Amino acid sequence: MKITVLTLFPEFFDRFVETSIIKRAIEQGHVEFSCVDYRQYTLDKHNHVDDTPCGGGAGMVLMCQPIIDCIKAVRDEHSLVVMMTPQGQKFTQQTAHSFAEIDHLILLCGHYEGFDERIRDYVDMEVSLGDFVLTGGEGAAMVISDAVIRLLNGVIQTQSHEDDSFENGLLEYPQYTRPIEYDGKKVPEVLLSGHHKKIATWRLKESLRKTLLQRPDLLENREFSKEEAVLLAEITQEKQKK
Ligand code: ADE
């Protein structure tokens, strides 16, 4: 797939593309990642891309001409144009999966007070990382690119993201590595047993326990399997005993 970030600050992404899994995904051809600077499209002799808000108020607003010309130049028949804004729909693991199916993802980063409202007519979708405000969309575009790239076939082992938090509607189970004992704290014995079924059951139970404790909202509309219902009952009993 191709990801193109439209931004006033392409340098923001310099280290992103040079580091770890993202670097390898680019080198191995799983993703083509590039940035385009809105300023390349300004027709203003001073390279302005923003202006003061109509009606007054603080800050600056990104202008129609350079932003819309930039979108028009970069988009193609296979692209999805996504605007980063705190007003968008919340980005989730499900959104990451749907973006990973797109041939060409175009991520629009805002800055200052945001975009001229008319720019929204050239956008397919608005996405927010959550109910907080960033200085610009670059951080959001980096987060979204990372979440999408790691889902592309061949970037990491499929097993590795199938077990991730949210993939089955639950938080991920606790993970351990050597040493078997550290500062008096031991790795749960079942994980050393080599018994795959018992390990899978323990992991499911601990996923349920963690989710119940830390994100009970994720369980609200869940249809529990028989095994999950039994494990949940055990967890509740164990809680009562404490
Ligand atoms: N730009 C500014 N705040 C943002 C947010 N919360 N999510 C996505 N883009 C943003």
Image (cartoon, helix red, strand yellow):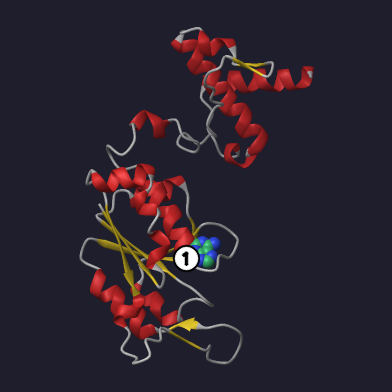
| Residue 88 in view of the camera | no
- Quadrant the C terminus occupies: top right
Q: Position of residue 218 (x, y in %)?
A: 58, 40
Residue at the spot 45% in from the left edge and 53% down from the top edge: 143
Q: Position of residue 64 (x, y in %)?
A: 38, 84
Residue at mark 1: 137
Q: Position of residue 103 (x, y in %)?
A: 24, 55
Q: Is mark 1 within 8 Å of ligand 1?
A: yes
Amino acid identity at mark 1: Gly
Q: Is residue 121 above or below residue 180?
A: below
| Residue 139 in view of the camera | yes
Q: Position of residue 170 (x, y in %)?
A: 53, 34
Q: Say which of 46 and 97 sits in front.
A: 46
Q: Is residue 158 above or below residue 134?
A: above
Badge 1 marks a residue whose secondary structure is loop
Q: Is residue 67 above or below residue 181?
A: below
Residue at the spot 72% in from the left edge and 18% down from the top edge: 238
Disc 1 crowd rating (10 Å Cα; few below 14, some 14-19, many 20+) is many
Q: Say which of 66 and 40 sits in front.
A: 40
Q: Say which of 97 and 191 sits in front.
A: 191
How many numbered marks does the figure carry?
A: 1
Q: Is residue 83 left or right of residue 136?
A: left
Residue at the spot 57% in from the left edge and 22% down from the top edge: 205
Residue at the spot 45% in from the left edge and 36% down from the top edge: 167
